[in-house]
Amino acid sequence: MVEHARMHAKHKGHEAMHAEMVLILIVTLVVAQLVLVQWKQRHPKSYNLVTLFQMWVVPLYFTTKLHWWRFLTTWFIFSVITAYISFRATRKPLACTTPRLVYKWFLLLYKISYATGIVGYTVVMFTLFGINLIFRIKPEDAMDFGVSLLFYGLYYGVLGRDFAEMCADFMASTVGYYNASGMPTKHLSDNICAVCGQPILVDVSEEGIIENTYRLSCNHVFHEFCIRGWCIVGKKQMCPYCKEKVDLKRMFSNPWERPHVMYGQLLDWLRYLVAWQPVIIGFVQGINYVLGLE
C-alpha cells in the first residue's frame, strides 16, 4: 500500500500533462497538414523538391543510427547511379544519349522495386496464413523479411518516380528542335530521330531486335527508347520536334502514368510518412521540451 501511495504521489498531475502533450500533438499535426497542402497547391515545384530531398535524406539518418547496413548499401548504390543520371539530365546542351539512358534506368528501377514489393507482400500474406511453418521458418523472421522487402520496393519505387519527374523539369526545357517562339532552330531529316539526332535503322513496319521505331500522328519517327524517354521524363503531350499536340499516352504503356488511384494514394501516404512525419514529430518533441513537458 505504501509503494502504491508513493507511485500515486510521484505521478500526481501527470494526467493533465499527458492531456496537454496529446493536444499539442493533434494541433501540430492539423496545422502541419494545412501548411503542407497549401504549400503543395501554391508552390508545387519547391514542395516536390524539398519532399524529394527529405525522402532521400531522412531514412539515411535513422538507418545510420540503427546500423541497418543492408539498407545503407542499397541506398548508396541507388544514390550514386541516380546522381549520375540526374547530372546527365541537367546538362545543357543535352547529350543525345541522355533520354535513352534516363528511360532505361528509371524503367529498370521501376521493375525491380515493383517485383520486390510484390515478393514482400506475398511473403507477408504467406506468413499470416502460416505457410512459413511448412519450411520451418519462424513467423517473426518471415514477417520481418516480408515487411523489409515491401518497404524496399515501395521506398525505391516512390523515390525513383520522383527523381524521374525531377529530371523531366530539366530535360523538357532542352529537348526539341524549336525554340520558345516556335521558330525552327534546325532541320530534321526523314531518317533522323528528333530526340537523339541519330539515324533510324529500323523501319516503322519492321520488328526491331533491340528496339522498334515509332511514328507519331504528325508523321515524325523516333527510336523507341528515345520517344519513351521523352514521354516519361518530358511528360509532354506533343511531338518533340514540331510541338504538334499528340496523344502519347495511348501509344505507350507508361508505368508512371497508370491511373491506379489506390496505388497513388499509397505512394502519397508513404511520401508523407517518410519525408514529413519525422520532422513533425521532432517539432512536437521540441515544443514539449521548451514547455517542460516530459
Image (spheres, rainbow, N blue to C red):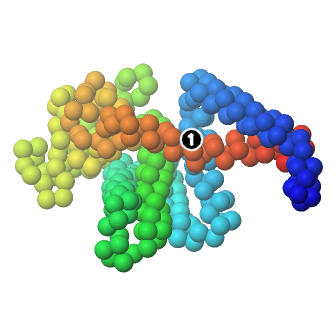
Residue on which disc 1 sits: 272
**Quadrant of res 38:** top right
- Is 251 or 99 nearer to us in this picture? 251
- Is 223 or 123 nearer to us in this picture? 123
Residue 61 percent across, percent down from the top left: 66, 59
Of all residues shown, which one is farthest toward the front? 1
**How many labels were placed on the picture?**
1
- Residue at 93% x, 49% y: name it: 9
Residue 203 in sight in this render:
yes
- Left or right, 287 with respect to 255, comes to right
Q: Secondary structure at mark 1?
A: helix
Of all residues shown, which one is farthest toward the bottom? 136
- Residue at 63% x, 44% y: name it: 277
Classify 237 as above or below 71.
above
Classify 150 as above or below 252.
below
Residue 146 percent across, percent down from the top left: 42, 63
Is the N terminus in the top left, top right, bottom left or bottom right quadrant? bottom right
**Quadrant of res 216:** top left
- Going by the numbered disc 1, the residue's amino acid type is Tyr
